[in-house]
Image: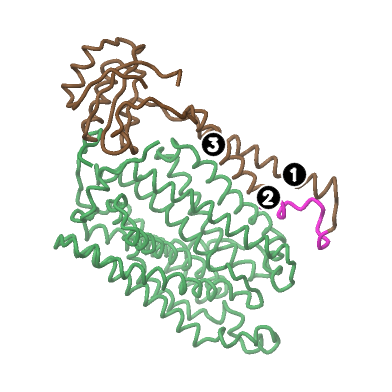
Chain colours: A brown, B green
Amino acid sequence: MANSTKGIAGIWEQESLVLKAARKTREAGFTKFEAISAYPVHGMEEACGIKRSWLPYVTFIAGVVGLGAGLLLTWWTSAVDWPINVGGKPLFSLPAFIPIMFELTILFAALSSVAALFYACKMPRIDPPVIDPDLTSHKFAIFVPFNDTGYDESRIEKMFKELGATEVKKTEF
Amino acid sequence: MAEHNHHVNLHVAKFQAPAKLKTISYALVGIGLLTFIVGLMKNQDRLWTSYLVAFFFFSCMGLSGLFWVAINNIAKAGWSVSIRRYAEATTAFIPAILIGGLILLLGFKHLFPWANPEYIASHPLVAAKTAYLNTSFFVVRLFVFALGCLIFRYIIVGNSLKQDVSGDPQLTHKNIGPSVLFVLFFSLMFSFFSVDLLMSLLPTWYSTIFGIYTFSGLFQAGMAFLAIVIVLMKRHGYVKGYITEDHQHDVVKYLKGFTIFWAYIAFSQFMLIWYANIPEETEYYIMRAQGGWMGISVLLMIFRFIVPFLALLPRGAKRNDTHVLVISTLVLIMQYVDIYWMVYPNFFDGHVTFGFWEIGIFAGFAGIFLLTILSFWTKHSLVPLKDPRMHEAISHHVSY
């Protein structure tokens, strides 16, 4: 797709090495680099200096909105728009409304989280550039984009090689 | 994992019970004994109700540890290995369930209305239940439960302690079978235990979810206690490296999860009874909606669910020692209030009654509970060092 970025990538075959490399890359002053792995690597967030995601806030706010929406819906349908006497209970009976409020809390929170996740990850992306097909199974990569501070291909290549990269290549991601 | 992003400095000190804490524990036991003896002579009714609440509270504490260890064994969990000893310590109280149960039988007639023939004669609904609600069957159930838990504790915790000496990894596998059996035994027998001790105080009333309700409280309180122990052990430097913020974080996740579970079960019990509106079922909640009990019912909802739930939502809150201590203590207090709320409306004409009887008996049990866990830690290593899954626990890491 149009919005991929040129840069340089190193390929590693060991989890421990890529974790170390990620930390060194951050310590070398790069901020926009990406670490690519087929599965979540423990400690990678800290190694890359990734801040906490803003997704939980979306979940929480959407949940609160869902709770309110549930209350509004049950109140309006059973006490305002079409009042029906059920078992002699008051028209506005909170205990009966709680299951619906709960369900809407979960529904709003879950769907909003997924939507926000898609937005945050720029999904769906149908043809992302492939740095190395083995990155989906047993290899790991660190990609530094050309516009990162202090970008210098020969310097990065040398650093990656020293950190145990099996391959360094100019690519886009 | 081959490498971890921060250097691990491992250290376990030999546990020595702080002299002050020991003195306090003995003093608490003394207060309890004194209250008990005076109560036997002066005020048996008050004595036995307060005894029942405290007995049930600490039985739950002891059982929560065994249950938690069992589910971790079944799940073959690696992360929790290094904090297992803290849960195992609470099980040192289990022998006291047997002894305490024996003592409870002394107050049998004061507590359970169905133990009186005149009550049964005047309540045909209760008379129909005597196949279950009779003294001998009650005693049998109580003993099967207490003895069974003791035997399972002997096997499950025993294997773990044996491994400390022999280092045999087979002991870890050997613990899976007994753990599965214990969970099955526990789920059935703890329901009976709750129904017998708490639900049968109002023999005309029944709730089919009652056993799960008491279990949810047990587990929530157990996790609160575990979280407190983790924070204190870290703070006093007995163990370094084996327990980290990440362990604390996951235990508090348990605490938060079972806070929600408690609310879910409590509400399920309430809503179905409220909706169906059948007299035999609603009497339980009517008793708890009158006089001062309404306030306590609302208090439970707020401080056992809403406050801990919101307070434990943020990630930072689960990793903040003081915050975890405060919320866990609140949960433990509410566990007491919850059991109190299940027992007391049945007595003293439905008036809210609380005083030094309740405090004294609770203090006695608390003293015994503290002494049993302190002696457990003094006798055994604070960390099961030779567990084959220890490496997983040391490198345990909670990602964002």
Which residue is pictured at 72% across the width and 44% down the height? A71
Vertical arrangement, residue B98 with respect to residue A20, above or below: below
Label 3 neighbour load within 10 Å: few <14, some 14-19, many 20+:
many
Amino acid type of the residue tagged 1 in the rendering: Leu
Measured in 3D between alpha carbons, the distance from the residue under mark 1 to the one under mark 2, in whole angstroms, is: 9 Å
SS for dot 2? helix
- Contact, mark 1 vs mark 2 (Cβ under 8 Å): yes
Q: Could you say which is closer to the camera, residue B140 or residue A10?
A: A10
Direction from residue B225 to residue A41 in the image, left or right: left
Residue at label 1? A73
The verdict on a common chain for dots 1 and 2 is yes
Residue receiving disc 2: A100
- Chain of the residue that carries numbered disc 3 in the rendered image: A
Q: Position of residue B3 (x, y in %)?
A: 21, 37
Query: Which segment is the magenta one?
Result: A86-100
Residue matched to label 3? A113
Q: Secondary structure at mark 3?
A: helix
Q: CA distance from mark 3 to mark 1?
A: 22 Å
